[in-house]
């Protein structure tokens, strides 16, 4: 489970561990006992967030104009194709 430095608290980390996930949260600079984290996994988070940000540029996806799940997934597929072809 990925999170920003703002989520670097013991209650949040314990809740993530209770779910059976590993917390990938960089420690806050003022934390006395910084927890270990994997930096390359945290950096991969940027690629995921960047992809969602590009999808949100399509107004029909951001506001969910489509009524059915089938047509919405088709719109997502078309938006992904358009984004891929722009590269």
Image (cartoon, rainbow, N blue to C red):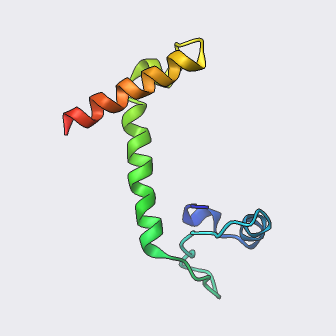
| Residue 65 located left or right of residue 32 | left
Report x, y in % for residue 52: 44, 40
30 versus 68 height, above or below:
below
14 versus 62 height, above or below:
below
25 versus 65 height, above or below:
below
Relative depth, front residue between 32 and 85? 85
| Residue 60 located left or right of residue 86 | right
Relative depth, front residue between 83 and 37? 83
| Residue 10 located left or right of residue 53 | right
Q: Who's the residue at 39% across and 43% down the image?
A: 51
Report x, y in % for residue 23: 63, 69
Q: Who's the residue at 56% across and 66% down the image?
A: 5
Which image quadrant for residue 44?
bottom left
Q: Residue furthest bottom?
A: 33
Relative depth, front residue between 14 and 5? 14
Which image quadrant for residue 83?
top left
Figure quadrant of the C terminus: top left
Q: Who's the residue at 77% across and 62% down the image?
A: 19
Q: Who's the residue at 57% across and 69% down the image?
A: 24
| Residue 1 located left or right of residue 72 | right
Which image quadrant for residue 67?
top right
Report x, y in % for residue 17: 75, 70
58 versus 20 height, above or below:
above
Figure quadrant of the N terminus: bottom right
């Amino acid at each position: 489970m990925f999170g920003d430095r703002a989520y670097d608290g013991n209650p949040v980390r314990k809740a993530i561990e209770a779910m059976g996930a590993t917390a990938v949260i960089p420690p806050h600079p003022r934390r006395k006992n910084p927890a270990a984290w994997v930096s390359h996994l945290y950096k991969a988070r940027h690629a995921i967030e960047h992809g969602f940000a590009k999808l949100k540029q399509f107004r029909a996806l951001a506001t969910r104009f489509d009524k059915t799940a089938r047509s919405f997934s088709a719109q997502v597929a078309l938006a992904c194709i358009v984004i891929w072809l722009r590269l």
